[in-house]
Amino acid sequence: MSEVTHPSFCRVEFKLFYDWNGDRPTQILIFRQNEFSWWIKVVVDWSLPELITELGYFQRRSLFQMSLQAIDFRQMQLLQNTVTKITLSLTDQNQNLITIRDGFQATTNYFIVVAHRLRYEIAEDPTRVIYPNLDRDLNIPTFEASCLQNAEFLAPTVFTVLFKQRKFAYKTIDRPIYEPGDTEHIMNEIDALAQFRGQPNIAQLVGLVVSENPYKTCSSTKLPAVVTGFLLEYYTGGSLERSINEDEIRNDSLPIRWAIQIGTALESLHTRGRTHLDIKPSNIVLDANKNAILIDISGTGGYLWEWLSPEMQALIQQNIDTTPANTPFGVRVATDCWAYGRLLSTIAEKCPPGGTGEKLRFVGEALNKAAPESRISLRDALAQLEDNRRLRIGLSRLNII
Ligand SMILES: Nc1ncnc2c1ncn2[C@@H]1O[C@H](COP(=O)(O)OP(=O)(O)OP(=O)(O)O)[C@@H](O)[C@H]1O
Ligand SMILES: [Mg+2]
């Protein structure tokens, strides 16, 4: 990361813009000059006057972007192969003042009017999206990002993509709201997925998606390739959340099948020393034959408060540094089983009266007892569900149901 002398031709490409209720605008952009590109995040570090905060979002964005076009970034010591954070503040000192390009000085744009008092500070952006180098030998196939054709949006972090006419789900590190730690969660998910290749009812990893480092400054520099996400088999049946929200579950054999499949997948995570910690209907998808597939298995990502066991909630309330992922294995297993109980009860609510819903509700309640010692184990829950399924198969053969 050192200074680069700038030839003359330059342009600005705007990326994400956001602000806080009209104040403190922030703009991510790429500043290009010949074969050089710098990623920059410009942050306003003073409270804007009402005449700006009262403007609509788009007007404010356009005003700020116009002023950024006017800034001469060539005078700044931009950092290479990363994101440079430029913090602008109003000052009466005359050090590190920004320079406005010729031809832009005479304008009524608020930011340019105050430009003679605008001081800039440069640092590496600590909140930039971190792309890990592809330097670990995971023995997983790799796919070049530029060879993937984007197809549909599934969620803010997941798209379908086409590769050689086949559709896959692509989970990306880059996302609209990236938080420090997200890269680590993705790498943990890759490790977990690699461990469960070939395992039924757990999402199947197809490969890593790699690309040239997006922050590369000089196009001719050689840098290691980076991981931008991973490809999964694409499961065409939608999420269990969608099935539950859409309608009553009419096929009476599905709920018990899903319950057994999810419980068995969860049990295999636990047997191999892992926990899920985010069991909920949107983390289960259905394949073309309506089999349930567990996804989002990093064991360290986000979680929903109401899907945590009461004792896990209590641990977190006692210490703000506690997250589900850093609690002892037994507590994590217990919260997974508790969430599984809640999932069974949620599915049961959508089952027609008198069918398998009754059994799911019963097992769900037995997993959700307030005191951990009075709950049944996941093994017992699965044994009860298997018995019920066998019984129903027998009765249907006898034409009794
Ligand atoms: N392999 C897949 N096949 C089909 N759909 C998928 C697949 N993977 C993910 N999805 C869809 O994308 C959604 C989000 O996926 P995932 O849970 O992995 O992302 P996430 O960002 O961790 O989500 P959240 O934080 O909400 O749990 C899922 O609910 C599902 O609808
Ligand atoms: Mg999820």
Image (cartoon, grey):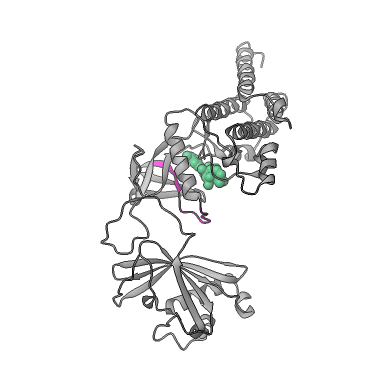
Name which residue lies at 33% across and 64% down.
217
210 relative to 192, above or below: below
Quadrant location of the C terminus? top right
Q: Count all numbered tags in the image, as a single digit.
A: 0
The location of residue 99, given as percent across then percent down, is: 42, 82
Quadrant location of the N terminus? bottom left
The location of residue 73, given as percent across then percent down, is: 39, 75
Name which residue lies at 45% across and 87% down.
105
Q: In front: 323, or 204?
A: 323
> In this rendering, would 28 be left or right of 248?
left
> In this rendering, would 90 be left or right of 340?
left
Q: Residue furthest top?
A: 398
- Residue extent of the magenta highlight: 167-180
393 relative to 278, above or below: above
Q: In front: 186, or 343?
A: 186
> In this rendering, would 196 be left or right of 4?
right
Name which residue lies at 53% across and 42% down.
300
The verdict on residue 317 being magenta is no
The quadrant holding residue 283 is top right
Q: In front: 349, or 107?
A: 107
The location of residue 357, given as percent across then percent down, is: 68, 27
Name which residue lies at 46% across and 59% down.
128
The location of residue 377, given as percent across then percent down, is: 64, 24
Q: Quadrant of ligand 2?
A: top right
The verdict on residue 179 being magenta is yes
